Amino acid sequence: MPGAFLLEIATPDRLLVSEQVTQAQIPALGGYIGVLPEHAPLLSALGTGVLEYSLGGHRRSIAISGGFVEVLPDHVRVLADHAENADEIDVQRAQESLKRAAERLSQAGGEVDIARALNAVKRAQARLSAAGK
Amino acid sequence: MPSLIDIRRRIRSVRNTQQITKAMKMVSTARLRRAQERVVAARPYARILREMVANVAAAVAAAGTAGGTEAPDDQPLHPLLAARPEQRVLLLFFTADRGLAGAFNSNLIKAAQRFLVENAARTVELELIGRKARDFFRKRPVRVAGEQIGLGNKALYEDIAPVIDKVIDRYRKQEIDAVYLLYNEFKSVLSQKLTVVRILPIELPAVAAEREYIYEQPPEELLRLLLPRYVGIAVHHALLESTAAEHAARMTAMDAATTNAGELIEKLTLYMNRVRQASITREIIEVVSGAAALD
């Protein structure tokens, strides 16, 4: 397919996505990167957020956190620590964990606690926004 | 000569056992299929990661030779690559949680003991994964670093992640000099292969296709993030393989048990018929000779 590239999203447990897509938004560690076909080779660590890709007008979202991404001209490979399809996300659970994490954040003591709570908040937010809530 | 009733009872008991082994075989078949699917599902991640590690490591090595060698305190750049004399060794030992899988667990335990003998000159610690490993070494004088039970059920990466983190952390702190895995690899349904591999220090994979990348983070930084994952995937892979091998072994064992039970039932039935025939014959003789005595 011209104007498309292969997007693969894998977690240690499974291959989540393997599709021809026309563009993708990837939450890299340093901020979102937009990828179109024929992108220059790039390697980056992943942050936490929503990965969006579109194929033939359809847009899909996947909540991911942690991992790595390799961009090649005809191929994008995402290795995520955690990844969830929008339709797999349990919105209620995500909301609860967001609330919990926010609470923890407000009363967190040490630096590690704050970082961890912040990460939990981000992850919950990513899951919620991927689910479209 | 055993009575008819005794033999009948015996046949019934064997038949009950056969039903159990047949059911266990079917359960194992289903579990094996799922375990194999998990092995396959985990493959893409491992493959991509291997290529990434190879590429990034090559980039770091190239940068290192270009800009002088590492500073003395720069070891943490990739401490997981640092080879030391192997004085203290950690063995991650994968067995099943359950028995009745033929020689699956006993072969593993024999191999573990062999490992301990071969490395008697070193300090060997064991991380026991699976109930059978724990039960066996509980009463023996070995150093046990930890015990994990119930990991094989789902065998998700996050199930075994705490173990991986602990191992990496200890290696980094130089509490241990090398880490080995001992597990049964799934060769086919009929055969498992005992496998011993060293996962730490890491041996870098060969570069398959070298590419010039734009690095969002410095390659050193990426390598620092990648390497623990690389170790983790090796451990997770062992868990997956071991689980698949376990179910395959149990399936084969239970199939053999079912066949044996069938043979036994056949033999007992034959014997029972013979005994019954004998008693009938005896009764006839008694009746006939009784009648003859009256004449």
Image: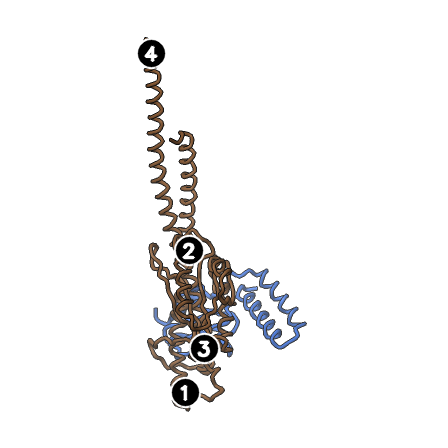
Of mark 4 and mark 3, the one earlier in the sequence is 3
Query: Which chain is blue in the picture?
Result: A
Q: Residues within 10 Å of mark 4 (few under 14, many from 20)?
A: few
Percent from the top left, x then y, of residue A18?
Answer: 40, 65
Q: CA distance from mark 4 to mark 3?
A: 99 Å
Q: Are marks 4 and 2 on the same chain?
A: yes
Q: Amino acid at mark 3?
A: Leu
Of mark 4 and mark 2, the one earlier in the sequence is 2
**Front residue (pair B259, A115):** B259
Q: In front: mark 4 or mark 2?
A: 4
Q: Amino acid at mark 2?
A: Arg
Of mark 4 and mark 1, the one earlier in the sequence is 1
Percent from the top left, x then y, of residue B279?
Answer: 36, 24
Q: In front: mark 4 or mark 3?
A: 4
Q: In what element is the residue under mark 2?
A: helix
**Front residue (pair B248, B109):** B109
Q: Are marks 1 and 3 on the same chain?
A: yes
Query: Which chain is brown in the picture?
Result: B
* Residue that mark 3 sits on: B80
Of mark 1 and mark 3, the one earlier in the sequence is 1
Q: Which mark is residue B64?
A: 1
Q: In what element is the residue under mark 3?
A: helix
Q: Amino acid at mark 4?
A: Ala
Q: Is residue B110 visible?
A: yes
Q: Is residue A34 visible?
A: no
Residue depicted at x 47% and y 59%: B136
